[in-house]
Amino acid sequence: MNLILLGPPGSGKGTQGAILSQRTGLLRVATGDLLRDAVKRGSELGLKAKGFMDRGELVPDEIILGLLEDVLSRPEAQGGVVMDGFPRTVAQAEKVDQLLEARGERVDRVLLFNVPEDELLRRIMGRAKEEDRSDDTPEAFRRRVAVYREQTAPLVDYYRGRGILTEIDAVGTVEEIAERIEEALGL
Ligand code: ADP
């Protein structure tokens, strides 16, 4: 089963992705984590990505498409993954379709995390203190929300049109939201 977690920054995809991965045994793939790790290691990918991430911009597709190919071709990704933080553009969504199709799989379900914007801002400012993420400043966060609306939100229609989109009310306790997700997936 291949699942996509879709939603604005701070909507809880990472937390729920980790829980979902534990409960299903599916590998969680998070492009944000992979990129932050690359930045920390100072790899070529990290050097290219850092400026975009700090400004709250998307890392360009020409860099991300290759990363998706690498990560989805790994043996442990065969048979199903939980995708957290990607696809973020239509080009990335098409790439995911193509990579899965090549091995006889497909995107089975997309969970859209719904959270009002004032709640997002509250959460992200709390996280900035805890995690020391260089892109959790108010300016970068605002930019990330705007970028989500412009470049990622069109994916809602892309997947809704296929009948595989499920909206999740992502306000509540971590456990409540995890239960809503399990229910939505019939787990
Ligand atoms: P959040 O969901 O809170 O925005 P992520 O960890 O998913 O955080 O992403 C952090 C940053 O990493 C993004 O703002 C962007 O710069 C970069 N990034 C992560 N995934 C992608 C992707 N699929 N395409 C382009 N940029 C990405």
Image (tube, rainbow, N blue to C red):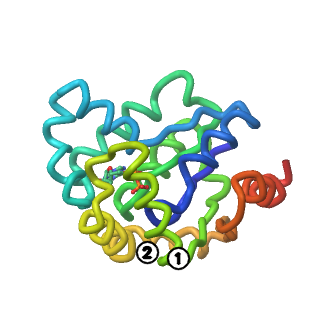
Name the residue located 20 percent from the left edge and 34 percent from the top edge.
45
Residue wearing tag 2: 154
**Location of residue 139 (image quadrant):** bottom left
Name the residue located 49 percent from the left edge and 62 percent from the top edge.
123
- Disc 2, SS: helix
The kind of residue tagged 2 is Pro
Mark 1 in CB contact with mark 2 (< 8 angstroms): yes
Name the one closer to the observer, 146 or 44.
146
Name the one closer to the observer, 44 or 165.
44
Name the residue located 38 percent from the left edge and 69 percent from the top edge.
148
The image shows residue 126, relative to residue 81, as above or below, that is below
Tell me the number on the disc at residue 68.
none
Q: Position of residue 77 (x, y in %)?
A: 55, 30
Residue wearing tag 1: 157
- Disc 1, SS: helix
Q: Position of residue 177 (x, y in %)?
A: 73, 58
For the image, the number of numbered tags is 2
Queried on whether the Cβ of the residue with tag 2 lies below 8 angstroms from ligand 1, the answer reads: no
Counting other residues with Cα less than 10 Å from the Cα at mark 1, is it few (<14), some (14-19), or many (20 or more)? few
Residue 110 placement, left or right of 122: right
Residue 179 placement, left or right of 37: right
The kind of residue tagged 1 is Asp
The image shows residue 41, relative to residue 66, as above or below, that is above
